[in-house]
Structure formats: structure tokens, C-alpha cells
Image (cartoon, rainbow, N blue to C red):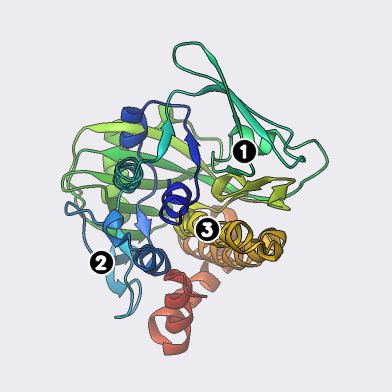
Amino acid sequence: MTVGNFLLRSGVDCVVVEKRDRAYVERRQRAGVVDTRGVRMFREWGMEHVVKDSSSPAKITGGTFIDGVRYDIAFGDDESEAVFCPQQVLVRNLTTAFLEAGGDLRYEALDVAPEDLDSERPTVRYRAADGSAKAITCDYVAGCDGFHGVSRASVPAGRLTVHSHEFPYSWLSVLAEATCAPYGMAIHDHGLAARFPRGADASRLYLQVPGDATPEDWPDDRVWTEVSARFGAEAPTGPIVDKRIVPLRSVVFDPMRYGRLFLLGDAAHIVPPMSAKGIHLALYDTEVFVRALLAQVKEGDGSLLDAYSDTCLRHVWNYQAYAVWLTDLMHNAGDASYGGAFRKQIARAELRRLNESPSAIRLFNDLNAGLL
């Protein structure tokens, strides 16, 4: 939706094809942090309003709990403009802006099949909700359909190299109709815990669990007991409306294009959710792609499109390094069953440095804000 809005505002026609219906898309819960770079990007494009959500905190501030003791840490310095904006709110705002500007958005497009991607005029075929066959012939295809989408699957075998790293633990991700308190991250011998707002009376909870855990292993009572134990404070409870296991992994596909197909966001790379950089990388890819496409369409300069993959991958690997470091740090500092007692003490030494060294804090803040 960001690609579509930016292109439309720049006078370039585009069609957005979506598998689900509008109601499903706009209530689908995902991540919720738009970092400083993302906020500034939307402002530069005259769309800062899309990251506004009156039901969530305007700034990302919270506590880090270590063995039940709270340490007040501000994520980002005074220049940080990062905001909590539930992803469904961002999508809803972007959708409204796109449609109000006359955008062509086609919901319930089934059996989507990109073809002739290595030609000058690729075609995207799909089946409409009424069963009729449709075809869109275009100049370029932006694959923004996630890790399991059809875009990357349409690339012939052997044309992309995959780099991946699997972590030995997973997260239990829980969406609850409960006030977000305690608010922040908790490091505990039982494992990591996190709690973040998803509206005025809803919160997203994460609990570190073994890599082979299932949702059935975690009945609601056990979830709330463990949240309270890891934060060292009684947690407000409420109905749990969604519960799933999230594997922690890093994945990068290289290159991020094939012919006239350009891969953006999760279609090209995955970062562990500990880093909160999935949206960041997707928005970075978006701006690089749109500016490169505009240079080609308006000025006949294809050099930026040719450099698209290299430009994005340099940034992607920088944040993969950040994401892996932060994931290892926060998990090793608590549960010693994976990294051992030695790595646990190393991780805690690093946490102390983050809390005491201005240089370490400055570097962390710049990476957290998306400014490096």
C-alpha cells in the first residue's frame, strides 16, 4: 500500500492486487512499531497522517525488567520520532489514502500468477471473486506479498541464493484484550517476555518458548502466570483472542529482483521480531524501489533500478547483524539452557554497558531509530 500511494502521488499508474477481502486485511494483526526513519519518510512524502493512532502511545518508552527488577530505559533519545501504530491501523490509513486518490485496488484476487517476468511486458493473471479470469500487463511487478507469497515463488529455481539462520527457541505470540501493563521487556531465568500495546485495551504478548513448543502447550492460565513471573509483577489479564508460535529466524534472498520483478519486504528477507525491524526494512525497500522507478519512468535513467538489489541488501545485512545481535543478547541474558552460563554472563555485561556507556547507548539508539 505504501508503494501504491507513493507511485500514485507521483503520477505513475499502478494496480494493487490483494488475495483477501478488505475487512480481513484491515483487522489482521501484525507488528506495530514504525521507527524514526519510517515516520520521517512518510512526512517527506506528505503522508505523516498515516502513522497516527490516537489509541496508542505516541512514543516508544518503557521498562526493562531483569529478574523482576525494573530498569527505566528510553528506547531512542530525545530526537526519536518512532511511534506505536498497529499495523492494521497503518494499512487502513494507507488504504483510505490510496482509494481516495483514485487508486486501483483489487481485493479477493485468487490464483495470482506472474508471467513473463524476464520480458519487457510481464503479465499478472488472477481469478476475480466472481470466477472470471483477469490479466494485467504492465512494465514492472513489485512483489510485496510476504514470505509465503507467489512473487518469489515465480522466480525460476536457481536464480536466487538464500541465506538463513535459525534460532533454537521460538516465541509464543499472544493477542489479548487486556491493558498493556507491565509494559516493556522482561529478562528472566524462565526466558524472555515482552508486552506492547495494540490499542487502548489490547496488548501483544511474547514469551520465549522451546523451539518445538505448540500453542496447546500454553493454556491461557499458564500464559498469564508466566507473564507475571517473568515481569515480577502481577499482570492484568483478559480474554486471549489469538495465540500462535513464531519461529525466530533470519532469511535473506539475493538478488532481490528477477527481470522486471522486484522483491520488497518479507518477500525478500525476514528478521527476528526481537529487532522490530520488519516494517523498517519493508519501508526502506519501498522508498528505494519507488525513487528508482520514478527515475526510470520520468527521466529514462535506469541506473537506480539496476542498483536496487545491491542498495537494499547493504541495508538489509546491516540490520540483520543488528537483529541477530539483539536477539542473542536478550535471550542469552535470561534462560541459560541455550547459550550456557558463560554466555548468560556475557550478555548481562553487554546490557550493563548499554545502560552505562554513552557511546554504546548512542549506537544502539541510532540502530533502533533506523538511522544507520
Q: Residue at x 55, y 57 (%)?
A: 285
**Marks 3/1: CA–CA distance:** 26 Å
- Of badges 2 and 3, the one in the foreground is 3
Q: Residues within 10 Å of mark 2 (few under 14, many from 20)?
A: some
Which amino acid, mark 1?
A: Cys
Task: Give coordinates of residue 247: x percent, y percent.
Answer: 54, 42
Which amino acid, mark 3?
A: Leu
- Horizontal side of 334 relative to 168 (left or right) equals left
Q: Examine the image and state in which quarter residue 315 appears.
A: bottom right
Q: Examine the image and state in which quarter residue 48 appears.
A: bottom left
**Marks 2/3: CA–CA distance:** 20 Å
- Of badges 2 and 1, the one in the foreground is 1
Asked if residue 135 is positioned above or below residue 45 in the image, the reply reads above
Secondary structure of the residue carrying numbered label 2: loop
- Near-viewer residue (180 or 262): 262
Q: Residues within 10 Å of mark 3 (few under 14, many from 20)?
A: many
Residue identifier under label 3:
281
Q: Earlier in the sequence, mark 2 or mark 3?
A: 2
Q: Examine the image and state in which quarter residue 297 appears.
A: bottom right
**Marks 2/1: CA–CA distance:** 41 Å
- Near-viewer residue (169 or 126): 126
Q: Earlier in the sequence, mark 2 or mark 1?
A: 2
Q: Residue at x 41, y 50 (%)?
A: 5
- Near-viewer residue (91 or 342): 91
Q: Residue at x 34, y 47 (%)?
A: 94
Task: Give coordinates of residue 307: x percent, y percent.
Answer: 70, 63
Residue identifier under label 2:
59
Extreme residue in the top direction = 131
Secondary structure of the residue carrying numbered label 3: helix
In the rendered structure, find residue 138 and report the number of the disc placed on it.
Answer: 1
